[in-house]
Image: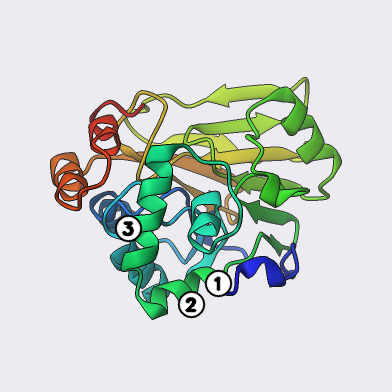
C-alpha cells in the first residue's frame, strides 16, 4: 500500500468565502452519530463542510461514513487513525490496533482512495484546519496543553485555527491563554470571533466524545456573523454500540459511548 506520506505535509490555500461551515472531527466510523449531526446541520443552513480527520477507527461503519463525506464534497484532513490504516507508523494501544486492522480489511477501494487524498493542513485565507497541530501535524500533539497551544500560535500565521484529536470541544483566545472547555451545553454555545486576537477552536468528537457528555459534538464557523456555534446532538448510542460488538471489535469502544469518556 502506498501511504499518504508521499504528499506535501501542508495543503494549499483553498481561499475563504464568507459562509457557514460545519466543522466535523473524530467521526470514528460512528454512522449513527454522524447522520444525526448532518441532520442537525441541515436545519442550521450550513453551506460547507470540513472534516478534521479520524473518520475511521473505533466504530463499525467506516465505509458508510466515508461515502457520506464523499457525497457532501467535504474537505478532509488526515487523522492519526486514518494514517494508521494507511500503514503510516502510529503509536496505538492493542485494542486500537485491532480496530485499525479490522478497518483495513473491510475498507472498499473507494474508501481507501479517499483516505489517501486527505491533506495534513488546509488553509482558507486567514483560517487553517488540521487534526492535531499545524506545525508538526504527524506528531499528533494534543493542542489542549500549554506547550502545544503556545507552539500552535507561534508557528502558525492563522487568525483562526481549527483542530480536533482531543475529543473535547474548546475555545482558546491568545490573550493570557484564555481557555473555555464547553461541557454539556443544553443548547447552542456561541463564542464570538475576536476582532484582533488569534483563536483556536476544537469541535470535539462526533463519534467518541471524551468530556463526559455522550452526545455527538460539532461546531459551525459562521464567518458572515463572526461567531462559532458549538452543538451537542443526541443519537442512537445503543445501535452504534451494538454494531461494534457485532463486528467483533473490542467491547471497550462500545461501552465508552454511553459515558462519553
Disc 3/disc 2 C-alpha distance (Å)? 23 Å
Q: Which residue is mark 1?
A: 116
Asked whether, in this view, residue 129 is left or right of residue 25, the answer is: right
- Residue located 32% across and 58% down the image: 38
Residue 184, picture quadrant? top left
Asked whether, in this view, residue 193 is left or right of residue 157, the answer is: left
Where in the figure is residue 79, as x and y percent of width and height? 55, 53
Would you say residue 194 is visible in this rendering? Answer: no
Structural crowding at the residue carrying mark 2, measured as other residues with C-alpha within 10 Å and reported as few (<14), some (14–19) or many (≥20): few
- Residue located 37% across and 76% down the image: 71
Pointer 3 or 2: first along the chain: 3
Disc 1/disc 2 C-alpha distance (Å)? 5 Å
Structural crowding at the residue carrying mark 3, measured as other residues with C-alpha within 10 Å and reported as few (<14), some (14–19) or many (≥20): some
Q: Which residue is mark 2?
A: 113
Kindly state the secondary structure of the residue where label 1 is placed: helix
Name the disc covering residue 38, or none: 3
Kindly state the secondary structure of the residue where label 2 is placed: helix
Nearer to us: label 3 or label 2: 2
Kindly state the secondary structure of the residue where label 3 is placed: helix
Nearer to us: label 3 or label 1: 1
Asked whether, in this view, residue 15 is left or right of residue 76, the answer is: right
Front in this rendered view, residue 221 or 109: 109
Would you say residue 38 is visible in this rendering? Answer: yes
Amino acid at each position: 500500500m502506498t501511504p499518504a506520506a508521499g504528499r506535501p505535509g501542508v495543503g494549499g490555500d483553498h481561499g475563504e468565502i464568507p459562509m457557514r461551515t460545519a466543522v466535523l472531527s473524530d467521526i470514528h466510523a460512528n454512522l449513527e452519530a454522524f447522520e444525526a449531526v448532518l441532520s442537525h446541520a441541515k436545519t442550521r443552513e450550513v453551506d460547507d463542510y470540513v472534516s478534521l480527520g479520524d473518520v475511521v477507527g473505533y466504530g463499525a461503519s467506516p465505509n458508510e461514513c466515508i461515502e457520506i463525506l464523499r457525497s457532501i464534497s467535504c474537505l478532509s484532513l488526515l487523522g492519526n487513525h486514518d494514517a494508521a490504516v494507511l500503514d503510516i507508523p502510529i503509536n496505538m494501544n492493542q485494542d486500537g490496533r485491532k480496530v485499525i486492522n479490522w478497518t483495513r480489511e473491510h475498507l472498499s477501494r473507494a474508501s481507501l482512495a479517499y483516505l489517501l487524498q486527505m491533506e495534513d493542513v488546509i488553509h482558507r485565507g486567514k483560517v487553517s484546519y488540521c487534526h492535531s497541530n499545524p506545525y508538526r501535524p504527524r506528531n499528533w500533539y494534543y493542542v489542549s496543553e500549554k506547550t502545544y497551544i503556545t507552539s500552535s500560535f507561534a508557528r502558525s500565521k492563522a487568525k483562526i485555527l481549527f483542530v480536533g484529536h482531543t475529543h473535547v470541544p474548546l475555545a482558546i483566545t491568545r490573550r493570557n491563554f484564555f481557555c473555555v472547555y464547553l461541557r454539556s451545553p443544553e443548547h447552542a454555545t456561541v463564542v464570538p470571533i475576536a476582532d484582533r486576537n488569534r483563536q483556536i477552536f476544537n469541535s470535539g468528537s462526533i463519534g467518541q466524545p471524551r468530556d463526559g457528555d455522550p452526545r455527538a459534538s460539532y461546531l459551525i464557523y459562521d464567518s458572515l456573523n463572526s461567531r462559532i456555534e458549538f452543538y451537542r446532538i443526541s443519537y442512537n448510542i445503543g445501535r452504534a454500540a451494538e454494531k461494534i460488538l457485532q463486528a467483533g471489535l473490542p467491547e471497550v469502544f462500545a461501552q465508552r459511548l454511553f459515558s462519553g469518556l
